Amino acid sequence: MNSTQPAWDRDTVLGIIDALKHKPGALMPILHGIQDSIGYVPPDSVPLMAEALNLSRAEVHGTITFYHHFRTTPPGRHKLEICRAEACQAMGANRLVAHARKTLGVDFHETTADGAISLEAVYCLGNCACSPAVMVDGELLGSVSQESFDELVGTLRSQP
């Protein structure tokens, strides 16, 4: 295992691979299964998938990095998604995104240094009338300003 990666359960990953490797197009179900189970796809699991599916490591890595849904690092305690669709952009989402990146010190698909918040982009939350919209741990919030974003971040950082 890479010393910079957190520990992950190799047996869990091998169990998922074994259970799904015979499905047609097995790589995607396996990737979803791993991420659903442990929260991300550990880079050190790539050789395990490649060997089981008779694919190159490059093919597996390319699939993981092509789809933004897949994470290669553990997620934060809270998932904060900012809508990047047209209506939200028209109502200030780009300024909110710049503020979020600066405030959190991370870009999309990254987690704050304290492990509290993972910042993600999402393309339409269906809350266009209350743009810009944000979703936090599955809760939809509308008309989010930079000030209300800061309050939200403070609350999230104080929660376990």
Image (cartoon, rainbow, N blue to C red):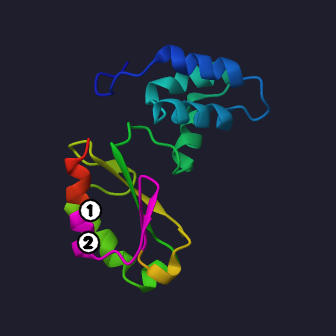
The x and y percentages for residue 99 are 25, 70
What distance separates the C-alpha of mark 2 from that of mark 1?
6 Å
Would you place residue 122 above or below residue 50 in this image? below
* Residue tagged 1: 152
- Observer-nearest residue: 37 or 31? 37
- For label 1, the SS is helix
- For label 2, the SS is helix
Quadrant in which the C terminus appears: top left
Would you place residue 53 above or below residue 24 in this image? above
Q: Residue at x 38, y 76 (%)?
A: 93
| Residue 4: quarter of image | top left
| In-image side of 120 versus 125 (left or right) | left
Question: In the rendered structure, which amino acid carries the disc numbered 2?
Answer: Ser
Disc 2 to disc 1: CB gap under 8 Å: yes
Q: Does the magenta portion include 138?
A: yes
The residue furthest right is 24
Which residues make up the magenta segment? 133-151
| Residue 103: quarter of image | bottom left
Would you place residue 152 above or below residue 87 in this image? above
Q: Which residue is drawn at 78% across and 28% down?
A: 23
Q: Which residue is drawn at 33% across and 69% down?
A: 97
